[in-house]
Image (cartoon, grey):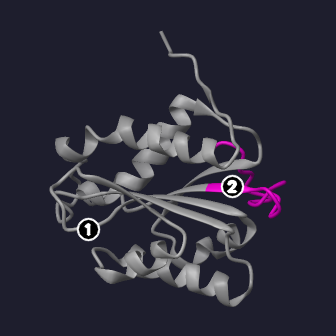
Amino acid sequence: MRGESPADPLGAFDRQDGILVLGIGNLLWADEGFGVRAVEALDAAWRFPPRVRLMDGGTQGLALLPYVRAASSLLVLDAVDFGLAPGEVCSIRDDDVPRYLGAKKISMHQTGFQEVLAAARMLGEYPERLALIGVQPMELDDYGGGLRPEVRNRMPWVVEMAVDILAGWGVAGKRREALV
């Protein structure tokens, strides 16, 4: 994603006002890849100030800990089993995020990410603001399959929700020019 250098992965990211938008999931398993696709869509459509880092967190689990510890605010995009109809979208805030991610495991990265949040809290470097935008998956067990239409069609709405959350956190994004 933009703004990340292999030599210095945290770059100039400042804990005092750094915002991390993290898409998590596995692109190889159907709707499981929603979070990664959502952060890609956000990056393709919007530009943000340098204090906002958009990141493909994949299924990295505890390897994400330095990024979470460095963020004052964290927005997670993911496929989450809310027990709703496929494609339904929910937004959860603050202390409810780690509790919900651990309530009903649908994939290995959720357990790993709950552990990332717990480790950050234990180390005293937990984001001051935390939000999760999750889409109810339809299919997770299709290796090599893409997002199902019910999930893929929610992408524009999730991107706008993310922009709204960031605006509420004092970040004004600018829409990128459409490529012709």
Residue under pointer 1? 81
Answer with the quarter of the image where residue 62 lies. Answer: bottom right
Tell me what residue is drawn at x 80 percent, y 64 percent. Answer: 15
**126 left or right, relative to 92:** right
The overriding secondary structure of the stretch rendered in magenta is: loop
Q: Position of residue 95 (x, y in %)?
A: 52, 76
Kindly identify the amino acid type of the residue bearing the numbered disc 2.
Answer: Ile
Which residue reaches farthest front?
168
Q: Position of residue 135 (x, y in %)?
A: 31, 55
Kindly identify the amino acid type of the residue bearing the numbered disc 1.
Answer: Asp
Magenta stretch: residue 19 in it?
yes
Q: Which residues are magenta?
A: 1-20
Magenta stretch: residue 48 in it?
no
**107 left or right, relative to 140:** right
Tell me what residue is drawn at x 41 percent, y 74 percent. Answer: 109
| Front-most of residues 44 and 77 | 77
Q: Position of residue 86 (x, y in %)?
A: 17, 54
Residue under pointer 2? 19
First in sequence: mark 1 vs mark 2: 2
Q: Position of residue 141 (x, y in %)?
A: 17, 65
Which residue reaches farthest top?
180
The answer to whether mark 1 and mark 2 are in CB contact below 8 A is no
Mark 2 surroundings within 10 Å by alpha-carbon count, few (fewer than 14), some (14 through 19), many (20 or more): many
User: Can residue 1 be spotted in the picture?
Assistant: no
Tell me what residue is drawn at x 79 percent, y 56 percent. Answer: 17
Judge whether 11 appears above or below 126 on screen: above
| Kind of element beneath mark 2 | strand
Instruction: State the CA–CA distance, disc 1 to disc 2.
Output: 25 Å
